[in-house]
Amino acid sequence: MFKLKYFKYIIISIFALLLGSCTETTNQVRPTRSQAANNVTSSNPPARGPADTLAPRTNSKEHRLALVIGNNDYQDSYMGKLRNAVNDAKAIRTELTKRDFEVLYHPDATRKQMF
Protein backbone atom coordinates (compact mmCIF):
# COMPACT_ATOMS: atom_id res chain seq x y z
CA MET A 1 0.00 0.00 0.00
CA PHE A 2 2.86 2.32 0.79
CA LYS A 3 4.32 1.96 -2.72
CA LEU A 4 0.93 2.60 -4.33
CA LYS A 5 0.63 5.96 -2.52
CA TYR A 6 3.99 7.14 -3.87
CA PHE A 7 3.16 5.80 -7.30
CA LYS A 8 0.00 8.00 -7.37
CA TYR A 9 2.05 11.07 -6.43
CA ILE A 10 4.61 10.31 -9.10
CA ILE A 11 1.92 9.88 -11.78
CA ILE A 12 0.16 13.10 -10.70
CA SER A 13 3.49 14.99 -10.71
CA ILE A 14 4.38 13.74 -14.18
CA PHE A 15 0.92 14.66 -15.46
CA ALA A 16 1.18 18.17 -13.95
CA LEU A 17 4.65 18.61 -15.44
CA LEU A 18 3.45 17.57 -18.90
CA LEU A 19 0.36 19.73 -18.66
CA GLY A 20 2.43 22.75 -17.62
CA SER A 21 4.83 22.33 -20.53
CA CYS A 22 2.01 22.41 -23.09
CA THR A 23 1.61 26.18 -22.97
CA GLU A 24 2.38 28.39 -25.94
CA THR A 25 5.80 30.02 -25.68
CA THR A 26 5.14 32.95 -28.03
CA ASN A 27 2.11 35.02 -28.86
CA GLN A 28 2.70 35.18 -32.60
CA VAL A 29 -0.38 35.58 -34.74
CA ARG A 30 -0.34 33.90 -38.12
CA PRO A 31 -0.92 36.47 -40.91
CA THR A 32 -3.94 36.19 -43.14
CA ARG A 33 -3.49 35.31 -46.80
CA SER A 34 -3.94 38.95 -47.89
CA GLN A 35 -1.44 40.19 -45.29
CA ALA A 36 1.09 37.62 -46.44
CA ALA A 37 0.62 38.72 -50.05
CA ASN A 38 1.36 42.33 -49.07
CA ASN A 39 4.64 41.35 -47.37
CA VAL A 40 6.46 39.93 -50.38
CA THR A 41 10.24 39.84 -49.93
CA SER A 42 13.06 38.97 -52.25
CA SER A 43 13.07 35.41 -50.91
CA ASN A 44 9.40 35.10 -51.85
CA PRO A 45 8.99 36.36 -55.42
CA PRO A 46 5.47 37.35 -56.49
CA ALA A 47 3.31 34.75 -58.17
CA ARG A 48 3.43 34.71 -61.94
CA GLY A 49 0.30 34.74 -64.03
CA PRO A 50 -0.36 32.91 -67.28
CA ALA A 51 0.83 35.87 -69.36
CA ASP A 52 4.27 35.65 -67.71
CA THR A 53 4.73 32.02 -68.71
CA LEU A 54 3.89 32.39 -72.41
CA ALA A 55 6.58 32.18 -75.05
CA PRO A 56 8.56 35.43 -75.31
CA ARG A 57 8.52 37.55 -78.42
CA THR A 58 11.04 36.43 -80.97
CA ASN A 59 12.27 37.81 -84.26
CA SER A 60 12.33 34.39 -85.88
CA LYS A 61 10.39 33.80 -89.07
CA GLU A 62 8.79 30.58 -87.86
CA HIS A 63 5.03 30.40 -88.25
CA ARG A 64 3.32 30.05 -84.89
CA LEU A 65 -0.36 29.17 -84.80
CA ALA A 66 -2.69 28.98 -81.81
CA LEU A 67 -6.28 27.82 -81.55
CA VAL A 68 -8.17 29.57 -78.75
CA ILE A 69 -11.71 28.51 -77.85
CA GLY A 70 -13.70 29.87 -74.92
CA ASN A 71 -17.16 28.44 -74.33
CA ASN A 72 -19.50 30.08 -71.85
CA ASP A 73 -22.62 28.35 -73.09
CA TYR A 74 -22.40 24.58 -73.44
CA GLN A 75 -25.17 22.72 -75.23
CA ASP A 76 -25.15 19.93 -72.64
CA SER A 77 -27.50 20.86 -69.81
CA TYR A 78 -25.38 19.26 -67.07
CA MET A 79 -22.54 21.71 -67.69
CA GLY A 80 -24.53 24.90 -67.22
CA LYS A 81 -23.44 28.39 -68.24
CA LEU A 82 -19.94 29.59 -67.41
CA ARG A 83 -19.13 33.23 -66.70
CA ASN A 84 -15.53 33.87 -67.70
CA ALA A 85 -14.43 31.38 -70.35
CA VAL A 86 -14.91 33.80 -73.26
CA ASN A 87 -13.20 36.64 -71.35
CA ASP A 88 -10.26 34.36 -70.53
CA ALA A 89 -10.02 33.27 -74.17
CA LYS A 90 -9.96 36.94 -75.27
CA ALA A 91 -7.11 37.66 -72.86
CA ILE A 92 -5.14 34.67 -74.12
CA ARG A 93 -5.78 35.75 -77.73
CA THR A 94 -4.47 39.24 -76.96
CA GLU A 95 -1.28 37.94 -75.33
CA LEU A 96 -0.60 35.43 -78.09
CA THR A 97 -1.12 38.10 -80.75
CA LYS A 98 1.43 40.31 -78.97
CA ARG A 99 3.89 37.42 -79.19
CA ASP A 100 3.50 37.08 -82.97
CA PHE A 101 1.16 34.09 -83.03
CA GLU A 102 -1.49 33.70 -85.69
CA VAL A 103 -4.55 33.12 -83.53
CA LEU A 104 -7.67 31.26 -84.58
CA TYR A 105 -10.23 32.52 -82.07
CA HIS A 106 -13.65 30.92 -81.62
CA PRO A 107 -15.82 32.15 -78.74
CA ASP A 108 -18.76 29.87 -77.88
CA ALA A 109 -17.87 27.45 -80.67
CA THR A 110 -20.22 24.59 -81.36
CA ARG A 111 -18.97 21.02 -81.52
CA LYS A 112 -19.24 21.16 -85.31
CA GLN A 113 -17.11 24.34 -85.46
CA MET A 114 -14.43 22.74 -83.28
CA PHE A 115 -14.00 19.74 -85.55
Image (tube, rainbow, N blue to C red):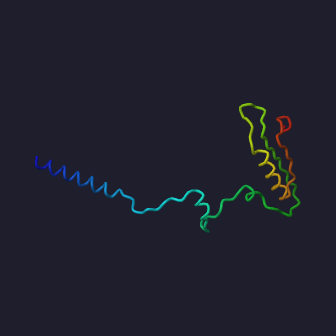
In the rendered structure, the answer to whether residue 103 lies left or right of residue 17 reads right
Looking at the image, which is closer to me, 93 or 62?
93
Q: Classify residue 108 by image quadrant.
A: top right
Tell me residue 30's x, y (percent).
51, 59
* Position of residue 82 measured from the top left corner of the image (x, y, whole percent): 74, 40
On the rendered image, what quadrant is the C terminus found in? top right
Please give the name of the residue rendered at 85% of the width and 46% of the height, measured from the top-left corner: 105
The number of numbered badges drawn on the structure is 0
Q: Is residue 96 above or below residue 40?
A: above
Q: In front here: 53 or 28?
A: 28
Residue at the spot 89% in from the left edge and 60% down from the top edge? 61
Q: Residue furthest left?
A: 2
Q: Is residue 93 left or right of residue 52?
A: right
Residue at image coords 61%, 60%: 37
Judged left or right of residue 1, residue 80 is right
Q: Nearer the viewer, residue 83 or 113?
A: 83
Q: Quadrant of residue 70?
A: top right
Instruction: Give the percent coordinates (x, y) of residue 32.
Output: 56, 57
Quadrant assignment, res 35: bottom right
In the picture as drawn, the residue positioned furthest to the top comes out as 77
For the point 19% across and 49% down, the residue is 8
The percent position of residue 46, horizontal first and vertical second, equals 65, 62
